[in-house]
Amino acid sequence: MATGRVSAVATTTTSPASTSDPVGGHRPRLLLIDGHSVAYRAFFALPVDNFSTTTGQPTNAVFGFTSMLINLLRDERPTHLAVAFDVSRRSFRTEVYEDYKATRSESPAEFRGQVDLIKEVLDALRVPYLQKEGYEADDLLATLAARAEREGMDVMVCTGDRDSFQLVTDHVHVFYPRKGVSDLLKLDPAGVEEKYLVPPARYPELAALVGETSDNLPGIPGVGPKTAAKWLAQYDGLENLLARASEVKGKAGESLREHLDDVRRNRDLNHLLRDVELDLGPRDLARREVDREAVHQLFDQLEFRVLRDRLFALLPGESDAPDGPSGGIEVIADAPAQGALASWLDQHTATAPTGLDVTGRWSAGTGDVATIAIAAADGHAVTVDPSDLDPADEQALAAWLADPTRAKVVHDGKGPLLACWSRGWAPAGLWSDTALAAYLLRPDQRSYDLADLVTRALHKELVVDESGEAPAQLALDLGDETTDLGHESRVRAEAVRQLAMALEDELATHEATGLLHDVELPLMQVLAGMERTGVAVDTAGLDRLNGDFDTRVRQAAEEAYAVLGHEVNLGSPKQLQAVLFDELGMPKTRKTRTGWTTDADALQTLFEKTEHPFLAHLLEHRDAIRLRQTVEGLLKAVADDGRIHTTFLQTVAATGRLSSTDPNLQNIPVRTEEGRRIRQAFVVGSGYESLMTADYSQIEMRIMAHLSGDDTLIEAFRSGRDFHSVTAAHVFGVPAEEVTPAQRAKIKAMNYGLAYGLSAYGLSNQLRIPVPEARGLMEDYFGTFGEVHTYLNGVVDEARRTGYTATLLGRRRYLPDLTSTNRQRREMAERMALNAPIQGSAADMIKLAMLKVDARMREQGLASRMLLQIHDELMFEVAPGEREVLEELVRSAMGSAMALDVPLDVSVGTGTSWHDAAH
């Protein structure tokens, strides 16, 4: 047996200045950033509509600022770094001149709060920032720049304020945003003089003459930069010019003499102070290692996955471990002789959980295996290529994989499961999945990449150090047969093993161990089976639908053109704005940076107000395009077996709900005629009798009744009558049979909306009633169901105290924004706190139901198959003669999935298509 040591090591990198850099050789390099200036430019450079979190927090300024900072760290490699902010608009300059900057408009609402987020980013990056009452950020930057230059440092000042040009010297350069924050103009003394015709020291003198519009400092009428520069050169500076103003000829000279006081005032105000007393000096601003965990948490909240990748690419060896960079992940690489794999497995994997890494390809419910790496707890690891195994070794590997007593750990294991199944292997004994474990601990995280998790939990870096090899590729789905993945796969397997041990301890602390081992892990295997099976579709029917929707798209466009009398690009917001608000003179919608919004909600509201035929055709056009795209996606997803194999995602929704992708079967309309036609194309497969669907009725309301303990609400469910009519009868004080359709609709909206933090304003919009009427309706509702009101208030208060909400199974969702000083973020977190326990408990319930249904189907040896889970609905393919027994099994398993104080109502239907099986 050959052995060798392979390690994934963390290496520390330094940031020396480039000797060819124009600012200077190996002198310390200080980067200073004007925080407000850059943030404001970033806000207007990036559309706010395209940059916001799922909680509704705008992030365009934060994203742009952080992106620019990362670029500067990458390109300029500063050794020292700081950011300065304005405290307020009041400073010593406004004491001198009340109208200083008075023409600046109030910051947009979407900008407010983003500066605080930028400061949170800086805290995570361990970048110091400064601010001082009575002074502007420019004064702080000027003070630091002057001191740094005196102390032998090179300085880079990034700001959108032209006053900073006066700071430029051979060792102080200004980075001025030329376009947005991605295109920076680097100005040295020659650059300033070339652009403004004066050396940097005289730039404020030039600005005093011509004025500065952004600061509300008027210049001399009729005097532009060229004239001002000529005067400054001719009279050798501003003081001489003012002293000899009588000598300046012409109308420009007269204008100068009439505005001497303005010029002097301008010069006093645009002079940057270089002697502000500060707590930190240039040498205190040395770059520090970032707080990786803080970066992960904050970037998760901001949903900055790409920026995080870019940032960490700059820091290949930094770690937030207290004792500095880690020694890495080491394995002893074994190469068992032919026929000796069984012996190796018995020797090394008999006791503790073993890390498993599978590389290959998997999609459409199938896959293939390229390599399998096994990392044992004793430090030994082996990589096997299935194509090179002799029969004895392959039999040993298959038996080991199928042995439930040999505990195995995987990362994102559903794909590897499919790949193993494709070779006839049946893995069992899955003890942990590190992606699922991390998801339970941090459900709002956007990514569960193995490298990120290893860094966060183990404080190590997955960088392979073997004869100068490049860093390992960390994605599991590699499948590149030309690459020797043996050492990389072994290191990943060991990383997964170590990570599982670390996360297991954390799961116990968060009381989530049961959720992983009893729910998510077994469910992963059920979902893999469903993906492998897929659902049959009528492709001819989908083709006809696609043609019908395509015709609708063209007809709607032609009818819209006919109303206008000319063609317009119906997909262009800019052209639609011109048509709707200029040509047709319609009421304005919500203002955005690019004009009045033309999003779907705004257009629907506009149509309800105006009933204009152009809007009717435009909405029809959009709807037809959406339907056509849905059908096109379904057609592309049909595999060679004539079935669609969607992928179920367990780690996307923070509430615990499953997601569907490639294709997304959750976005097929349920209650529309078009949605029913699409569902008609999902059919029973060959050799099976029918499709069966089963779902829970009003599950979230039943969970709210249970959680709140409201006797009146519980009794409404126990009565067995129409729930919305019964609750409406209580609210309006009439018998249930006398409840009108309008009254039922109002209470139905209340019933479903409360769990989502529905406000009186939201209810008024939904029901198209005045806000006071909606508020009165809510008061009547809570007066009837008082315990519901108490519960909803209490769940937010409890989450604010603990920092998280919990489902009936204990699934947590962490909501740090509940204590945010930003009102928008805090209110969004409050709505999440209301919804998470209810929607999360519903997600837990359907998962438990799936596990129970699957187990009973296997116990009874049924040939029927579970195909899909769409929210609260399950779909089955019924084998001949099994309909009655399957229906009884499904009703029983779903109805007993979780014990509530109200009965669980399960509706079941059968038919030859998804539509026909509806109930």
Image (cartoon, rainbow, N blue to C red):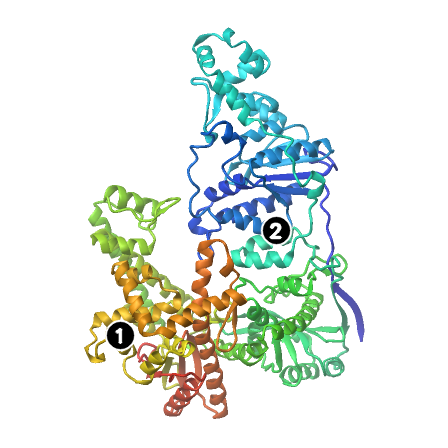
Q: Is residue 163 left or right of residue 779?
A: right
Q: Residue 850's x, y, as percent?
A: 46, 81
- Residue occupying image coordinates x 63% and y 29%: 168
- Mark linked to residue 123: 2
| Residue type, mark 1 in image | Ala
- From the image, tell me which residue sits under label 1: 728
822 lies left or right of 348: left
In the drawing, does residue 672 fall left or right of residue 412? left
The vertical placement of 900 against 663, above or below, is: below
Residue 702, quarter of picture: bottom left
Point out the tag, 1 or 2, that comes first from the N-terminus: 2
Marker disc for residue 462 = none
Q: CA distance from mark 1 to mark 2?
A: 52 Å
Relative to the observer, which residue lies in front, 814 or 848?
814
Residue 678 seen in the current view: no
Which SS class for mark 2? helix
Amino acid, disc 2: Asp
Residue 714 place in picture, x, y as percent? 36, 81
Residue 548 horizontal/vertical position (percent): 28, 64
Q: Is residue 428 visible?
A: yes
Q: Position of residue 677 (x, y in %)?
A: 30, 71
Rendering quarter of residue 876: bottom left
Task: Say which of 501 and 720 sits in front.
Answer: 720
**In terms of depth relative to the viewer, which is nearer, 650 or 569?**
650
Q: Secondary structure at mark 1?
A: helix
Q: Nearer the observer, disc 1 or disc 2? A: 1
Label 1 crowding class (10 Å Cα cut-off): few <14, some 14-19, many 20+?
many
- The picture quadrant where one finds residue 440 is bottom right
* Point 49% across, 61% down: residue: 818
